[in-house]
Amino acid sequence: MKKVMHLSNQLFLLLVLALGFNACESNDNKKPEYPSLKGEFVVCQGNFLKNNGAVAMYGDLATDNNIFKSVNDKDLGDVVQDFCIADTLGFVVVNNSQKVEVVRMRDFESVKTISDLSYPRYVAQATDRTVYISNGNGKSEQDEVVEFDFVSMEIVDRIKVGKGPEMLVKVGNKMYVANSGGYGTDNNVSVIDISTGEVVKTITSGYAGKAMKADKEGNLWVFCGGRVEYGPAPDFAKIQKDVPKLVKIDTKTDEVVTEIEYTGKVVGTDGSNLIAAAAKSNHIFFIADGVYKMELDATTFPTEKWEDNVYFGIDVDPSSGSVYLMDATNSKVLIVNDQDASVIETLSDTKSFPHKVVFNR
Amino acid sequence: MVNTFNSVYSSGIRSNFLRICEPIGMKKLLFLGFCVWWSSTALGQYSLSDTVKVMEVEVTASRRKHLSEGYKTVTIAGQQKEQYNQRSVAEFLQYSSNLNVQAYGSPGALASLSLRGTGSSHTQVNWNGFPVNSVTLGSADLSFLPVMENHDVDIVYGASGALYGSGTFGGAINIDSRPDYSKHGFHNSLSLGLGSMNTQKAVYSFQGGNDSIQISGSIWGDKSDGDFEYYDDIQGKQLKRANADYTQFGINPDFSLKLPNRVELSGGLWYQVKDLNLPAIMGSAPKDIENQKDSLFRSYLQFKKSFYKSTLQIKGAWFNSDQHYTKYSPDLETYIFNSRIKSNALYSDANYRYFFSNSLSGDFGAIYSYTTADVVAYHGEQSEYDLGLIAALKYYSNQLRANVTIRKDWNDSYKSEVLSDIGVSYHFLEDQLIFRAAFSQKFKKPSFNDRFWVPGGNIDLKPETGYSIETGINYVLNLKKWGELDVDVSAYYSPIEDMIVWRPAGSDWEAKNYQSVLTQGIDMTANYRIQFNSLAWTTGASLSYNKAIIEELDGQIVDNQPLFYAPTWLSSAYSELSTTKWGVYAGWRFASKRYYDKNETLDPYWLINANLYYQFQFHNQKLRLSGSVDNILDESYQMVRSYPMPGRTWQLHLKYSF
């Protein structure tokens, strides 16, 4: 009996120790309540396979570098690729978790998870009750734009487009879809008539069109990275099979009007948000071997860099015109003056790989 | 004479041997022992004429065992191997030790060991003295290593760089074939196992021989669906693991042969194939199916000869591995990714040991390896050679034992500095109290991926360099009829420079000598054993504290940034009751939180495991029935971010020995 008691005492001691260790390590997470969610939302992709993608909020009244987790007590998932605000809701695209989280913009609480997706990439508002989600990796049957009705909270349509659909830009009543090829190859932009949900035109632009923005005149600018292969031993140097280029599309005619090649330039980043255009500006900004600023009517590559460093992504504040430069190496965003690139402010301590800013003013 | 004494020490039965020696005088006994051994060798007969059979003492210890003073070494005991027979070394370490195993969840999935806060490529895993770490990655997959009865498994903490070569900042695991010449006749065992997730296992083991020849080996096969339930904290619901099944098969025969003129020849083969489906990470449910097929073939041959005052050991090995990874799209009925990784390694190792006196010996060794790897991302087959020269001195006395080792390595892309190692142990109170200390310079060469991967590999990478300082005390208190208490405390300090990290560089990632790291800590273990007639009770606990931090990043000092997947606290405890017929075991282990990203941590976890067995003996036949339950409280946890670990699982085993 004595021996048995020794054993039970020991087991009890082990249990106490275990609970003690657990208590020391546990964290109390209280759900935050923010008075306002006005400000900037930085979309942070996170590290592939680490499930650490996030949306960081730098609000007028509060800052939270992982607001979804703070409010919903769970991680977003793997590779947070996009975020957009439509009506009173926010839509967060989580690429490698094959979902889009729908949140309320008054408190960022999740209200719906759209999960019947294979490879979601970007999201944009289409009508006053629907959003479009680009979905497909270029090597499956599903290369499409998914239409989601956020009033009924249902997927209402799937529109077949080119391979590896990426960014979506709405101009007028048309949604433009950049088809990058994904794991395959493609070289065009699909034009969807939003009122009918039909692809009405396919515009040949260039291979690997992974970034696309509209300028203040309603023209589209598409960055086409081109196809890449590797050279012979011993260096196995990266060879651009197609020269990267910027393609300008006139959305009134849906024709390519300008192509500006990056001759002699190497795009020094793996990021995909490489063009920024302001609603009120006569310029676009883009990233190649540095940051360039270019007039909207330019037809040749700028002769000088606007900023020497290469960043992971770039955006422009539609109200102030300030330029946001995504520094993935140091997990921060630099807000710079759109005239002389001087730093105005820094959004520090973002999560891994900040690549896009969404403005909620 | 000195051969015998040193090898006895090295085999770990030093205290018993000394108690025998004392009454008649050490030197006389040694001389007598040498004469007996010499005469029996000359006649080509090794068995004693006495009717009492004793385990043959190995004449020469390996260089690693002979020159290991100052380092903490833990051996997986025979009873533990019996309990974990049919399971991998990864599972054994996961459920019965406080070591930091990083496992990817599913049965059969990748599992590696991270010692003292360092990465998995900083622990060298050896099979009969040859490293089995991946040529391309630098780490060793412990899920490939079965726990086999005819192998000794030692874990050497902070193993010497001068002795082992590249990649021992954390330590080393040594898996060595162990012929037992005292076992005569032919013995077999057949084990069958069933478990959760439709797990099925079978192992046939054999051992046979006499005083001159021993053959042993195992043939095994196992499979599992790996479809455990887990809580997906990304999706926020309970799910069942999909696409996580595996099948594997292996064979591992060994032989040892004693030839005339004090020659011993030994060798072995190890062939294993595995077909493993790779489940998606937590939160992800892609339609694509990932699969990995591995095959590995390892072989070695060893020649040992003993002279009057010296021994010569020459061995060689050839390893081949082939990994085929695919990602398949059912929609398109085509492969999205289809890649092969093939590697070959040829090793040779020669060591000459000369005994200057009873207490002083010198080792002179040379190690050569030629390695090739053919990987699509290398854009062609790549190769490298390594040459290492070693010289060492060992001093041995009753109380003081010390060794000094120096080494220099040449590689086709670098040559190391001259590395040194000094290890010492001081024995008090007839080995009841042992103080040990060691200093060792270390290095780790870049892996093939670090050097040759396109894009990002860097052929100009320098090896990681550093050193370690170890110290420890081991105290054995013999309480006579109240059993025996064994307490061990050790402390270590190890800075590492030029640690290789893959960093974003423009549009790609590249390997860089990027960070300086410091790992330091304390390990404590206590074990107690007592025998009440036929009932044995063993219990113990361990506690490890480790602080592994990044001190500099790219030359810039940083503020105590923790290394990823390095828990500050690891702890375990166990208790076992057994007789010759039955046994019951319960164990607990704990790991504190671990960083997987800056400011992001995996939750701490603790597990409770248990097993019991009952065995029947009929003459020379034995039937053993055992059952185990792991993670009894069904704890949800991850060892690697995004890969859930199984909850409560069970296994039943039936082993028939004849």
Image (cartoon, grey):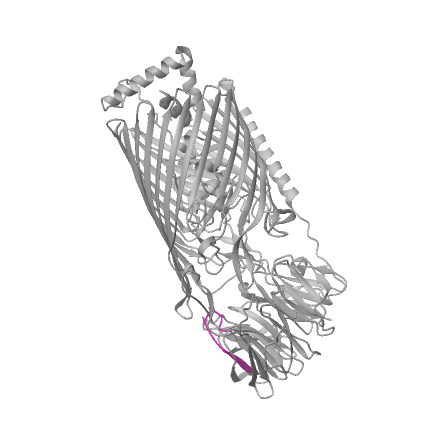
Classify residue B251 by image quadrant.
top left
Residue A184 within the magenta-colored segment of the rendering: yes
In the displayed structure image, the side of residue A349 where residue A254 appears, left or right: left
The N terminus of chain A is located in which quarter?
top right
Q: Position of residue B389 (x, y in %)?
A: 40, 37
Q: Position of residue B584 (x, y in %)?
A: 46, 33
Q: Among all residues in the image, which is located at the extreme top?
A: B24
Q: Look at the magenta stretch and give its main secondary structure.
A: loop
Is residue B206 visible to us here? no
Q: How many marks?
A: 0
Classify residue B19 by image quadrant.
top left
Above or below: residue B144 compared with residue B622: below
Is residue B483 visible to us here? yes
Above or below: residue A343 compared with residue B353: below
Q: Position of residue B108 (x, y in %)?
A: 42, 50
Residue A168 within the magenta-colored segment of the rendering: no
Q: Among all residues in the image, which is located at the extreme bottom?
A: A253
Above or below: residue A183 compared with residue B650: below
For the record, the magenta segment spans A180-191
* Residue closest to the eye, B513 or B627: B513
* Residue closest to the eye, B127 or A342: A342
Q: Among all residues in the image, which is located at the extreme left?
A: B43
The C terminus of chain A is located in which quarter?
bottom right
Q: Position of residue B234 (x, y in %)?
A: 57, 58
In the displayed structure image, the side of residue B349 where residue B628 appears, left or right: right
Above or below: residue B50 compared with residue B383: above
